[in-house]
Amino acid sequence: MSECRRRSGPCVLLSALFLVSCGSADEDGAPSIDTAEGTPAGRPVEISSFSNWDEDGDQHLDAPEFGMWTQDEDVFGDWVREEGVDVEILHEHLQTALDVNADGDIDEQDWSTAIQRLFDDGDPGAWSDWDVDGDGELDGPEFIQAAEDQGLNAQVDRNGDAVITRQELQEFYFRLFDRNGDGRLDSNEWSQGRATWLGHDDV
C-alpha cells in the first residue's frame, strides 16, 4: 500500500491545474506529503480505517503493521524526546486509562479492573501498595512512585536500561491492545485499544 493512499486517500489529478493532491515524489520516487495540506501542526490528518493498516488483508494487524500505524500517524510523536520516551507523558496516559468509570478519580474498583492489563504476566501488587496514604484514591505522585516500586516502568523498558525507546513503547501498547494474547489485533481490539489506552474517541 503506498504512502499516499495510506495517509491521504487516492491521488487525484486536477487536470486544469496539473496538480497531484498527495504532493510530489521524494528522491526514491515515492509520493510525499505536503505538510501544508496536513493539520495545523503540520502533521497528516489521521486516517482511522482499520483496513488502511492491514497490509496483507488478513483482517488483523500484526506487530509490524501496528508499528507502521503508530509511526505513520505519529501516535507517539509528542511522547518521544532525544533521550527516549517522556515517562511523565506515558504515566499521564496510563493514569487516565485506569480511570475506568471516567469520573476523574482512580479508586480501588477502577484499579482492580484494569491494572493487570498493564503488567502482562507480572504482579502489580496490592491496592495498598499503590494507595499509600489510604484515602481510597490513587493520585499522581502515588502512581509515579508505584510505577517504579511495583515494576510498571520495567514492563515498558524491557531491556532495563532506564531508557524507554519508541520501539519498546510500541511493543508495550501492542500488548495492551491484544486482549486475547494471540499476537495480532482484530478490528475490535484495535478500536477498543485506541479508545481505552490512548483516549481516541473517533473509533
Image (cartoon, grey):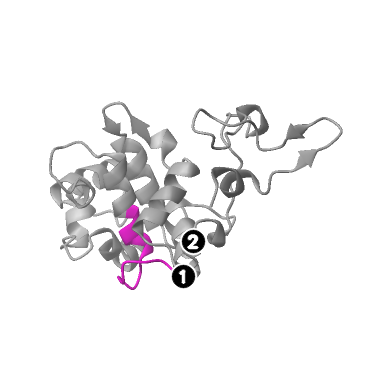
Q: Which one is nearer the viewer's eye here, 148 or 79?
A: 79
**10 Å neighbourhood of mark 1: few (<14), some, or many (≥20)?**
few
- 18, 105: nearer the viewer: 18
Where does residue 17 sit, x and y in percent of width and height? 83, 30
Residue designated by label 2: 54
- Check disc 1 and report the residue beneath it: 58
Q: Is residue 44 above or below residue 116?
A: above
Residue 129 in percent (x, y) is at 17, 55
Q: CA distance from mark 2 to mark 1?
A: 7 Å
For the residue marked with disc 2, what is the amino acid?
Answer: Asp
Which quarter of the rendering shows the C terminus?
A: bottom right
Is residue 163 among what the camera can see? yes
- Marks 2/1 in contact by CB < 8 Å: the verdict is yes
Residue at 32% from the left image edge and 34% from the top image edge: 86
What is the span of residues highlighted in magenta in the rendered image? 173-186
Label 1 sits on a secondary structure element that is loop
Confirm whether the magenta stretch covers residue 174.
yes
How many labels, in total? Answer: 2
Q: Secondary structure at mark 2?
A: loop
